[in-house]
Image: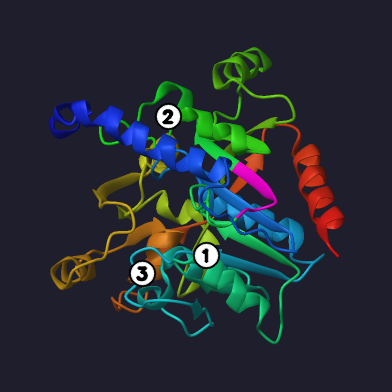
């Protein structure tokens, strides 16, 4: 915890009261929350960043895309445009944001849209010529103006919401009681060898409510890297030196993974969703080989001419119970379709 966050500790109770009052007003119906006659799944977290939303959203896309027509709706964080935008294969990160661009490039068959006003975004999607059967809201757990039918709450193993406090000193966007809105809670970025005893302890710590389901997932790193020159085995890096460039909330797991492989690299770390300056891009051009995350690749591609630039693909995998997770989500979708 940095010094500024410690200094701001007296403001934590005020932030707590404001967010608690806001949620209470929605819970009591004082503030309006709009429901829709279509399955809407919201994925989000109580804390700021670093919970693995993108790989979880991609997991859900893979689960649904061949069964129902699907649209994702995101805010489009740090884009240069305003209002509702539909992603195309020719879109760039500056127009729609890096994560929505990643979804569209990886799953061109689905509809990908951005709008900070989720109600307007949903209305635009439903009034389009190819109205989706299911809408997946990315990072919308606190967007109470929309009443989603199914909520998936993520919390990172290394920074559980039960061990955290409110902003500005901690990372919580709202009080821990907000977890009670979730249908499913997933502890993400777990060690692959997490024991059943530890899972039971975490279930007690997270205070899982009746009717909620708890799952544990980890990040799986593919044994290949992908770039403009195609896809190749990560083993090509064993006898070379590269620079790892990251602009994500928590790059440490990726750093640890490459270190465990015995790879030789420098690491340049930027803030989450970092917009690279001309000076930074010019420096990156001078590097012999760059490995980055897929999200960062979406922002760097087209802004630097380097051909020897690659990204590390990742996927969410469940330690156990993937079939239960899939079944609960698909049952909600099937029973909500009119």
Query: What residue would you read off at disc 3?
Result: 299
Q: Position of residue 319 (x, y in %)?
A: 67, 32
Closer to viewer: mark 1 or mark 2:
1
Q: Mark 3 falls on what kind of element?
A: helix
Q: In the rendered structure, are the residues bearing label 1 and label 2 in contact, judged by CB atoms less than 8 Å apart?
A: no
Which badge, 1 or 3, is on the more N-terminal residue?
A: 1
What is the CA distance from the residue labelled 1 to the residue labelled 3? 24 Å
Residue at x 67%, y 38% (from the top left corner):
184
Residue at x 45%, y 60% (from the top left corner):
294
Rendered-image quadrant of the C terminus? bottom right
Q: Position of residue 268 (x, y in %)?
A: 24, 51
Closer to viewer: mark 1 or mark 3:
1
Query: What residue would you read off at disc 1?
Result: 118
Q: Position of residue 288 (x, y in %)?
A: 26, 64
- Rendering quarter of residue 183: top right
- Rendering quarter of residue 37: bottom right
Q: Is residue 100 above or below residue 186?
A: below
Q: Residues within 10 Å of mark 3 (few under 14, many from 20)?
A: many
Q: Mark 1 falls on what kind of element?
A: helix
Q: Is residue 298 visible?
A: yes
- Nearer to us in this view, 136 or 235: 136
Residue at x 29%, y 27% (from the top left corner):
13
What is the CA distance from the residue labelled 2 to the residue labelled 3? 27 Å
Query: What residue would you read off at disc 2?
Result: 159
**Does the segment drawn in magenta span residue 251?**
no
Which badge, 1 or 2, is on the more N-terminal residue?
A: 1
Per the rendering, the mark at residue 133 is: none
Q: Residues within 10 Å of mark 1 (few under 14, many from 20)?
A: many
**Magenta residues, as a range?**
147-152
């Amino acid at each position: 915890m940095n010094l500024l966050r410690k200094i701001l500790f007296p403001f934590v109770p005020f932030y707590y009261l404001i967010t608690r009052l806001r949620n209470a007003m929605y819970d009591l119906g004082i503030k309006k929350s709009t429901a829709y006659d279509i399955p809407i799944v919201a994925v989000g977290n109580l804390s700021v960043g670093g919970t693995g939303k993108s790989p979880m959203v991609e997991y859900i896309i893979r689960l649904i895309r061949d069964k129902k027509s699907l649209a994702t709706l995101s805010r489009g964080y740090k884009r240069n445009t305003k209002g509702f935008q539909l992603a195309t294969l020719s879109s760039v990160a500056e127009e729609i944001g890096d994560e929505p661009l990643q979804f569209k490039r990886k799953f061109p068959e689905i509809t990908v849209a951005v709008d900070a006003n989720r109600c307007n975004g949903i209305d635009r999607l439903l009034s389009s010529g190819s109205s989706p059967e299911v809408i997946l809201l990315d990072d919308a757990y606190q967007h109470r103006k929309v009443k989603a039918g199914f909520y998936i709450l993520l919390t990172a193993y290394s920074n559980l919401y039960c061990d955290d406090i409110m902003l500005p000193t901690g990372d919580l966007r709202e009080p821990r009681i907000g977890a009670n809105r979730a249908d499913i809670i997933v502890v993400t970025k777990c060690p692959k060898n997490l024991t059943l005893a530890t899972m039971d302890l975490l279930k007690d710590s997270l205070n899982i409510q009746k009717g909620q389901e708890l799952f544990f997932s980890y990040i799986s790193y593919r044994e290949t890297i992908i770039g403009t020159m195609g896809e190749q085995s990560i083993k090509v890096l064993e006898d070379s030196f590269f620079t790892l460039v990251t602009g994500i909330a928590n790059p440490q797991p990726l750093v640890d993974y490459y270190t465990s492989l015995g790879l030789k690299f420098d690491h340049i770390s930027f803030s989450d969703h970092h917009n690279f300056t001309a000076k930074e891009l010019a420096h990156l051009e001078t590097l012999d080989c760059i490995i980055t995350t897929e999200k960062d690749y979406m922002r760097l591609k087209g802004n630097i001419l380097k051909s020897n630039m690659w990204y590390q693909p990742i996927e969410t995998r469940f330690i156990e119970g993937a079939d239960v997770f899939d079944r609960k989500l698909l049952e909600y979708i099937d029973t909500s379709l009119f």
